[in-house]
Image (spheres, helix red, strand yellow):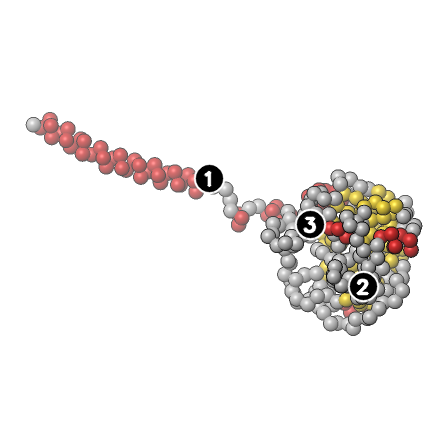
Amino acid sequence: MERKNKKKKSKFWIIPVVILLIILGIGGYFLKDSLTSKPTKTTQSSSAADQPKKTSKKDGYVEQKGEEAAVGSIVLVDDAGVPEWVKVPSKVNLDKFTDLSTNNITIYRINNPEVLKTVTNRTDQRMKMSEVIAKYPNALIMNASAFNMQTGQVAGFQINNGKLIQDWSPGTTTQYAFVINKDGSCKIYDSSTPASTIIKNGGQQAYDFGTAIIRDGKIQPSDGSVDWKIHIFIANDKDNNLYAILSDTNAGYDNIMKSVSNLKLQNMLLLDSGGSSQLSVNGKTIVASQDDRSVPDYVVMK
C-alpha cells in the first residue's frame, strides 16, 4: 500500500511542473522578441536625416516651419521695366559653357556670364522656349520660377532690376530665393529676411520656387521635395561660376547629390520642375519641355 501512495504522489507533482515549464517557455519567447526587435523610428540613426523624408502629401513636400515671413517691408512695383543684364564675374577664366553632365543629370557650368531674368511683372508673361531663343540665340536659357498655371502669374519671391515684383508669402513655412546681387555675387535668402534688406544688400534678381539644397557651402537637410521626378536647379560655386542643373526622371536625391559633390557648390536652389523643365544652349535644345510649355520666367546667361 505504501508503494502505491508514493506512485500517486509522484504523478501528482508532474502536472504543476509541466505547467511551470510552459509558463517559462512563453515568457522566454516574448523576452527574446523584445530584445531582438528592430529599432523604431525614434531609435534610428541620425543618418536618416540625410535622406528625403517620406510624405503622403500629393506634391511630395514636407513643409519646413520657421519664423513668420518678413513681408511688407517695401512697396511692390507694377513693372520692373526692361530686363537688365547683370555681370556675374568668376574668379577663373574657363569656357563660357561647359557640359559636365553625368548619371542622368544634365549639368552646365557657366563662366563669367551676363545674366538676365525675363519676368518683370505679375501679369501673364508666358513664352515658349523657341520665343526666348529667338530673342537670345547665343545664350544658355533655362526656365526658372514657378507660376500659376491658370493665370500665368509668377509665384514666389521675385526681384528684377533691383525692384520687388512679389514679396514672400505670409505664414511660417520657410521659403527660399536664389539672389544675384548687383556686383555679381550670389546668395540664398530665406523668408526671415525682409525684401528691403535684400535689395539694400544689392539684390538685383531673385529666383524662387523650392528648397535650398546647398546654402553657404553646406548641404541642407532634405525635405523630401527632391524625389524621382524631373527637377531643375540653379547654383554657384566657390569661384562664382553659375550652374544650370536638370535631373532626369528617376535620377533621385542621392544620385543628384553624388553628381554635384565634386563641384564645390556654395549655393544650390530647387527651381520650377516637372513639365516646365527645359534647357537650351546656343539655340540648341538640350532638354525639351514635356509639353512644349510656356513659362513666364527664364534665366538667360550669355
Q: Nearer the viewer, residue 98 or 185?
A: 98
Residue drawn 44% across the image and 41% down it:
35
Q: Which residue is mark 3?
A: 226
Residue 84: image location, x then y, percent: 89, 62
Residue drawn 87% across the image and 50% down it:
140
Residue drawn 66% across the image and 62% down it:
173
Q: What kind of element bears circle 1?
A: helix
Residue 61: image location, x then y, percent: 65, 54
Q: Nearer the viewer, residue 219 or 274?
A: 274
When asked about the image quadrant of residue 247, the answer is: top right
Seen in the image, is 30 located left or right of residue 122? left
For the residue carrying disc 1, how many other residues have a C-alpha within 10 Å: few (<14), some (14-19), or many (20+)? few
Q: Which residue is mark 2?
A: 124
Q: What kind of element bears circle 2?
A: loop
Q: CA distance from mark 2 to mark 3?
A: 28 Å
Q: Earlier in the sequence, mark 1 or mark 2?
A: 1
Give the mark toward the camera: 1 or 2. 2
Decide: is 183 above or below 101. below
Name which residue type carries label 2.
Asp
Q: Earlier in the sequence, mark 1 or mark 3?
A: 1
Q: What kind of element bears circle 3?
A: loop
Give the mark toward the camera: 1 or 3. 3
Residue 14: image location, x then y, percent: 22, 33
Q: Which residue is mark 1?
A: 36
Q: Nearer the viewer, residue 141 or 270?
A: 141
Seen in the image, is 221 located left or right of residue 113? left
Q: Could you tell me if the residues under marks 1 and 2 are in contact, i.e. CB atoms within 8 Å?
A: no
Q: CA distance from mark 1 to mark 3?
A: 34 Å
Quadrant for the N terminus in the image: top left
